Image (tube, rainbow, N blue to C red):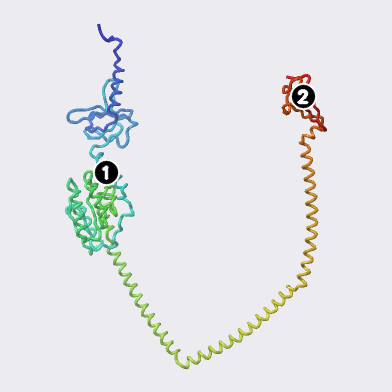
């Protein structure tokens, strides 16, 4: 006898594939897969179907049109790529496949992510902040170049420096600019330049190339050494569209090596023009100084002539006459002011006479008496009117006024409670009724509740 009925335990092929799909998607989820493109097919709907393979295996993949970003059309058979997506199964055929969500060239994609991660890390540490970067000297006494001594970059820089300002000496600190040892050699060359302290500015440079070619300039230790360097550094790496970590850390970024040479020194003809202008200004200032001294000498001669005894007596006599006239004028002005002040005081004394003050007080007193009498009469009238109104209002709510209209207040004689309901008393009990004038005591014969 079978333990399980094979008919009742069997599942359909669709159910089996659906379960396998669920297990694969939940077990693996989304993954990065590196491989070589083969069997690439572009469907009319825009979807791309392909295989990813390595030396010993391959897997089918689908890249749907709505998931495609960037230059998807540029991929071809034989390209080595990094594909990111969901591992799933195509239920109709039972084939498992990778549903691609993102795909990029294998080598450059990895380097790009490492570049972005290091850039974010150093930016958060403040190594890219503008306030920590040093200004370049207007005219350096000596320029240091850290690069390969045989590269095209150093030749371009030396050529432009010789044309723009050949008087500035140049020191080359040789280092590899590409390969596994390049980052270390660049750091050692920078250390040498710092230790020797013979240059006022440094240029870190190399020619253009791919991301892999420029990768030595994305080294974290080199970036930190550039940030800590006490000498201003110009980065001139690759072409204008190339960016490295060294560009962000350096004090100034030049778009090309030639651009660094343009930045680091001024144009010699401009400086010669400025020097000529300064020489002309110095000559004009000297001529003006001589003229000022000659004029000062003439002034001192006239001053010496004016200091003779005869000239002094004339000045003193003129001064005495001037002071005498000013004294007489001041005395007349003072007498006029005192006379005016005396008249003003007399008028004030007259205004403060006791007779006038008494008369004003009598008039004021009479006015106050009239105002007091009027105010008292008005207040008494208003108060009487208010009292009458309050008395009428009080009388209208008085219980005694209600009794005057024929009503009575009835109490239980025994308990003293006011009766509001006929059910509150029984036949034979005594009640007391207060009328408008007087009270009566009665015995209850019969009770009607009037329910």
Give the mark nearer the N terminus: 1 vs 2: 1
Which corner quadrant holds the N terminus? top left
Secondary-structure class at tag 2: strand
Residue 239 or 419: which is nearer the viewer? 419
Seen in the image, is 360 located left or right of residue 250?
right
Residue 50: x %, y % from top left: 25, 29
Q: Quadrant of residue 431?
A: top right
Seen at 43% across and 87% down, the residue is: 303
Label drawn at residue 430 = 2
Q: Badge 1: few (under 14), some or many (20 or more) residues near its Cα, within 10 Å? A: some
Residue furthest bottom in the image: 310
Residue 423 or 376: which is nearer the viewer? 423
Residue 198: x %, y % from top left: 21, 61
Which corner quadrant holds the C terminus? top right
Residue 284: x %, y % from top left: 35, 75
Residue 346 or 154: which is nearer the viewer? 346
Q: Which residue is mark 1?
A: 115
Seen at 79% across and 51% down, the residue is: 380
Seen in the image, is 269 located left or right of residue 147?
right
């Amino acid at each position: 006898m079978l333990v399980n009925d094979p008919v009742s335990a069997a599942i359909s092929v669709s159910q089996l594939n659906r379960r396998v799909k669920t297990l694969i998607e939940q077990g693996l989820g989304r993954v990065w897969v590196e491989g070589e493109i083969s069997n690439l097919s572009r469907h009319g709907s825009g979807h791309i179907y392909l295989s990813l393979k390595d030396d010993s295996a391959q897997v089918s993949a689908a890249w749907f049109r709505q998931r495609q970003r960037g230059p998807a059309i540029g991929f071809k058979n034989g390209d080595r790529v990094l594909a990111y997506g969901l591992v799933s199964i195509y239920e109709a055929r039972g084939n498992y496949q990778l549903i691609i969500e993102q795909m990029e060239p294998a080598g450059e994609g990895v380097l790009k992510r490492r570049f972005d991660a290091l850039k974010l890390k150093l930016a958060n540490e403040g190594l890219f902040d503008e306030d920590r970067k040093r200004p370049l000297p207007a005219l350096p006494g000596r320029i240091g170049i850290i690069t390969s001594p045989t590269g095209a970059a150093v030749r371009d820089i030396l050529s432009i420096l010789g044309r723009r300002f050949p008087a500035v000496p140049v020191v080359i600190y040789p280092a590899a600019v590409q390969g596994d040892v390049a980052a270390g050699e660049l750091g050692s060359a920078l250390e040498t330049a710092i230790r020797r302290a013979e240059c006022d500015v440094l240029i870190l440079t190399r020619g253009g190339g791919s991301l892999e070619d420029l990768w030595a300039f994305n080294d974290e230790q080199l970036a930190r050494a550039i940030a800590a360097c006490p000498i201003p550094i110009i980065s001139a790496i690759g072409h204008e569209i190339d960016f490295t970590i060294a560009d962000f850390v350096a004090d100034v970024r030049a778009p090309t090596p030639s651009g660094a040479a343009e930045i680091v020194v001024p144009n010699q003809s401009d400086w010669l023009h400025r020097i000529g202008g300064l020489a002309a200004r110095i000559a004009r200032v000297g001529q003006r100084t001589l003229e000022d001294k000659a004029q000062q000498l003439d002034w001192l001669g006239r001053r010496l002539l004016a200091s003779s005894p005869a000239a002094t007596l004339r000045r003193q006599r003129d001064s005495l006459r001037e002071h005498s006239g000013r004294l007489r004028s001041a005395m007349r002005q003072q007498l006029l002011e005192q006379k005016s002040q005396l008249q003003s005081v007399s008028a004030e004394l007259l205004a403060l006479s006791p007779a006038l003050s008494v008369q004003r007080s009598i008039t004021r007193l009479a006015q106050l008496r009239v105002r007091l009498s009027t105010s008292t009469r008005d207040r008494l009238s208003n108060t009487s009117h208010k009292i009458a109104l309050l008395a009428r209002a009080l009388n209208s709510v008085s219980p005694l006024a209600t009794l005057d209209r024929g009503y009575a207040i009835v109490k239980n004689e025994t308990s003293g409670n006011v009766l509001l309901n006929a059910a509150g008393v029984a036949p034979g009990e005594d009640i007391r009724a207060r009328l408008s004038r007087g009270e009566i005591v009665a015995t209850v014969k019969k009770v009607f509740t009037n329910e």
